[in-house]
Amino acid sequence: MAINIRQLHPHFVAEVDGVDLSRPLGAETIKTLNDAINRYSVLVFHGQSLDDDQLLALGRTFGSVAPPRNHRAGHRLQHAEIADISNLNVKNEVRARDDSRRLDSLGNQLWHSDASFRPISGALSMLHAHVVPPSGGDTLFADLRAAYDELDDETKELIEGLITEHSIFNSRGQLGHTDYTDAERAALPSVRHPLVRVHSGSKRKTLYMGSHASHIIGWPQPEGRLLLRDLMEHATQQRFVHAHKWQVGDLVLWDNRCTLHRGTRYNDAKYRRDLRRVTTQDMDSVQDNPELVAAS
Ligand SMILES: [Fe+2]
């Protein structure tokens, strides 16, 4: 079957037809998809049907898959490596309004890059829709390479070489959710990543930030926070953003190294939403936090 690739947004995002992701992919298909990832950052596949074993196998086709954070509420799915992007508890019931896991997951509605709070940050995420609500619950994507390109030269010069601190507790704290134990905090210490990176697959420069990023190392806190807010405001302008409206069977693959994303609100007390994700590790980021990587 021929692979068809159709660009969906003036800067990035493409729809891909002619690939069955539930089956092992041949070398030629993997190369075609890797080239498309490097060009478009976000690939949308419709009509896919992958069980959890197949989703994990797909993730491992593209790199080393790191398990998501542990939650004290337990894990609903069989594989620790699959992130449960749902509003369901371990009994497969809609989570209660005050469920700590629900409150934690509301942070996914802030712009972020998956696992940027990890010493080895996220590279590619693959998110597969099993159940979707009738309205809302979209995923928005922002193109950080295009956003970098459109910065003025003075700003590009200012931010070159800056290092940003990231923590999961920064994004959650922005929403006032601070209910984490000392052990949970100790398990996820703050990490550092460059604010400007060269995207290895395209050699293009990109911003790297999001709601986990709190401030700039070596700068007064308010000044660093303001710079990050300004850059976020710039990068999430409508012209850099694409909205994906989910259908059952969709699988969206995106590159966390050069995009941001966020979920949109939906009626999670009434409707079920069951999406499952795998994320590969960005091995280029190993050098960002050598002590933490060595200790892990
Ligand atoms: Fe995410």
Image (spheres, grey):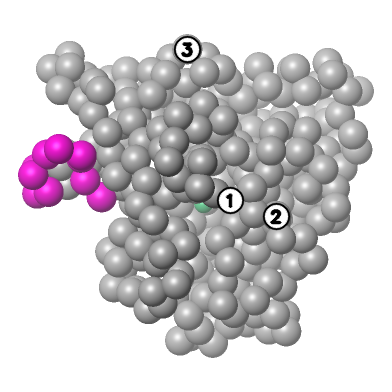
The answer to whether residue 232 is magenta is no
Of the residues shown, which amino acid type is indicated by label 2? Glu
What residue is at 52 percent from the left and 75 percent from the top? 101
On screen, residue 136 above or below 101? above
Question: Which badge, 1 or 3, comes first in the chain's sequence?
Answer: 3
On screen, residue 106 above or below 10? below
* Count of marks, rendered view: 3
Disc 3 is placed on an element classified as loop
Residue for badge 3:
203
Q: Position of residue 177 (x, y in %)?
A: 34, 74
| Label 3 Cα crowd, 10 Å radius (few <14 / some 14-19 / many 20+) | few
What residue is at 52 percent from the left and 18 percent from the top? 200
| Label 2 Cα crowd, 10 Å radius (few <14 / some 14-19 / many 20+) | some
What residue is at 23 percent from the left and 36 percent from the top? 231
**Residue 254 visible to the viewer:** no
The nearer-to-camera label among 1 and 3 is: 3
207 and 134: which one is in front? 207
Measured Cα–Cα span from mark 1 to mark 2: 25 Å
Q: Position of residue 123 (x, y in %)?
A: 56, 35
Measured Cα–Cα span from mark 1 to mark 3: 30 Å
- State the mark number for residue 174: none
Question: Which badge, 3 or 2, comes first in the chain's sequence?
Answer: 2
Residue for badge 2:
81
The nearer-to-camera label among 3 and 2 is: 2
Q: Is residue 221 left or right of residue 9?
A: left
Disc 1 is placed on an element classified as loop
Of the residues shown, which amino acid type is indicated by label 1? Lys
The answer to whether residue 216 is magenta is yes
Magenta stretch, residue numbers: 214-223
Residue for badge 1:
245
In the picture, the quarter occupied by the N terminus is top right
Of the residues shown, which amino acid type is indicated by label 3? Lys
